[in-house]
Image (cartoon, rainbow, N blue to C red):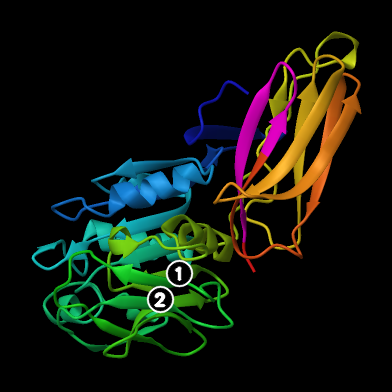
Amino acid sequence: SGTPQGTIADFTIIANSVGGYSDTSYFSICIGKYHYLVWDPSPDHSSGPVINSSLQSLGYNGVYSQTLPATELDKYIAIFVSVGIYADNYTIQSGSVEANALINFLNNGGRMYLEGGDVWYYDPLYGGYDFGALFGINATADGTGNLNSVLGQSSTFTNGMTFSYSGENSYIDHISPQGSASLILRNSSPVYDCGVAYDAGTHRTVGTSFEFAGLVDGSPPSTKETLAASIMQFFGISVGVKEEQIGGLNLPKFYSLSQNYPNPFSEKTIFKYALPKASHVNISLYDVTGRCIKRLVNTNQEPGYYTLKINGTELKTGIYFIRLNSRDFSISRKCMVIK
């Protein structure tokens, strides 16, 4: 339990036979993978930190880096890459160590989000690696600077999302899905595609031709956190629950309220909480405006460990807060509903 997350452990196996034959094998495994890596090589680093903070706010554990740790990508379940918008952009060169590392990561079952204004259409014409096939993307035009309003698409995980765009806006590539990939984001006027999701079976990807940081938060589900949560759900990555240590007599020593699991959720999720002494407990669910949606617990409870199940079928897509109040303790947890 004391091994740091993301540690690469090296093992040596020596096999000896009765006849004197000896063979030695070596292998390495990653202990406790991080949920994500944000690689931000863009010169102005405008979007990567926003991606990172959004994922952290959702409870995910990851690393932000302006350089790619090409030999250590097996530490991460997903990689988020922001290469920027012209003229503050970075080109991932074809045949480079970076390109090859990302290709191998995907071919080994990784999940990857890639955003950039030129990475899809322009860069491959001038030495950049063409990620189109890996992302199920057909780049159709170099584009201009007219990205205004980004719309989610029905029957996808962006359904109901609408964003104004205030980020860098120059030569925004036009990209469309090919094969079994799905269109998830489109500019409203002029109409062109700017976001594609792809489940290749062996790997999953999301590609956009704008910057995540440029999306302007509106009313849920039209927020960057909701979009980040939706992408992670598409990637199949949920935030887990840490079990509480049980003290003497099987009673907790402290009040606690764990993060729910799964999170995000669509139908059901579970919270766990602990009471070190008999308490009157009030647990309620609130929306982002502070309105109480539902009172879940309002009673006297004995000390111990409790599990609370929440049915999300009647909840709309968005961010919610669950709040536990007692006479001596108060805590809130943020959760996400995705439909």
Write the residue at 18% across / 84% down.
143
Q: Is residue 69 left or right of residue 185?
A: left
Residue 194 higher or lower than 94, as above or below: below
Three-letter amino acid code at the position of disc 2: Phe
- Label 1: which secondary element: strand
Main secondary structure of the magenta stretch: strand
* Label 1 sits on residue: 205
Looking at the rendering, the stretch of residues picked out in magenta corresponds to: 323-337
Q: Going by the picture, which residue comes out furthest to the top?
A: 248
Q: Name the quarter where the C terminus is drawn.
A: bottom right
Q: Is residue 188 magenta?
A: no
From this viewpoint, is residue 26 visible? no
Q: Position of residue 77 (x, y in %)?
A: 50, 52
Residue 148 higher or lower than 259, as above or below: below
Q: Is residue 13 left or right of residue 163?
A: right
Q: Quadrant of residue 311?
A: bottom right
Write the residue at 78% across / 25% down.
274
Q: Are marks 1 and 2 in contact (CB under 8 Å)?
A: yes
* Label 2 sits on residue: 135
Q: Is residue 332 magenta?
A: yes
Q: Name the quarter where the N terminus is drawn.
A: top right
